[in-house]
Image (cartoon, rainbow, N blue to C red):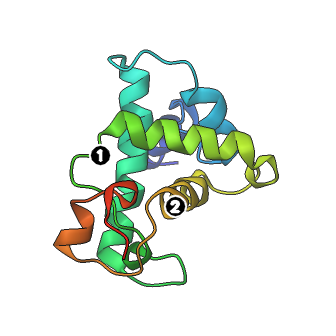
């Protein structure tokens, strides 16, 4: 084994995983954390990364075009909604945490389009005609 291969092998086997990505692991890891902690930052960064990926792809049956996330939505709200959704849907805990994040956002902020007007207004505050 050459020196580079040994370094790579040691790095892979000694490194701790940055974050587990099942719904169960997300729920266990992200529940009851202080919002200003480094661990909470990992949880919110993961969730925001999932949403950014959805924005970039804009495809699929539950793509970002199905979600009108208010511009003022903060990371804590996203994490809390995801945790609440995962607790309410225990059958999804074996799936990717990204699925839980996607479903939580699509159920809380549905819209069917991706316009600036809808992104800035939460569904509960929209006028109905």
Q: Nearer the viewer, residue 108 or 74?
A: 108
Q: Nearer the viewer, residue 10 or 63?
A: 63
Q: Is residue 25 toward the left or the right of residue 33 in the image?
A: right
Q: Which x, y percent locates residue 24?
A: 71, 40
Query: Please, what secondary structure does the residue beneath circle 2 have?
Result: helix
What is the residue that sits farthest to the left in this orientation? 116
Say if 1 sits above or below 69 in the image: above
Q: Is residue 85 toward the left or the right of residue 55 in the image?
A: right
- Closer to the observer: label 1 or label 2? 1
**Picture quadrant where residue 7 is located:** top left
Quickly name the residue at label 2.
102
Q: Is residue 115 visible?
A: yes
| Quadrant the C terminus occupies | bottom left
Quickly name the residue at label 1.
73
Say if 52 sits above or below 13 in the image: below
Q: Which x, y percent locates residue 21?
A: 59, 47
Q: Which x, y percent locates residue 15?
A: 50, 32
- What residue is drawn where x is 75% and y is 54%? 92
**Picture quadrant where residue 71 is located:** bottom left
């Amino acid at each position: 084994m050459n020196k580079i291969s040994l370094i790579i092998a040691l790095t892979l086997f000694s490194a701790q995983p940055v974050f587990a990505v099942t719904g169960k692991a997300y729920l266990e890891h992200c529940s009851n954390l202080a919002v200003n902690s480094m661990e909470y930052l990992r949880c919110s960064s993961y969730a925001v990364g999932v949403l950014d990926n959805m924005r970039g792809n804009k495809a699929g049956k539950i793509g970002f075009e199905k979600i009108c996330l208010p511009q003022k939505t903060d990371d804590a709200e996203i994490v809390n909604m995801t945790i609440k959704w995962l607790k309410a849907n225990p059958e999804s805990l074996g799936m990717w945490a990204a699925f839980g994040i996607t479903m939580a956002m699509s159920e809380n902020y549905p819209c069917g389009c991706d316009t600036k007007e809808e992104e800035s207004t939460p569904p509960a505050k929209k006028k109905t005609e």
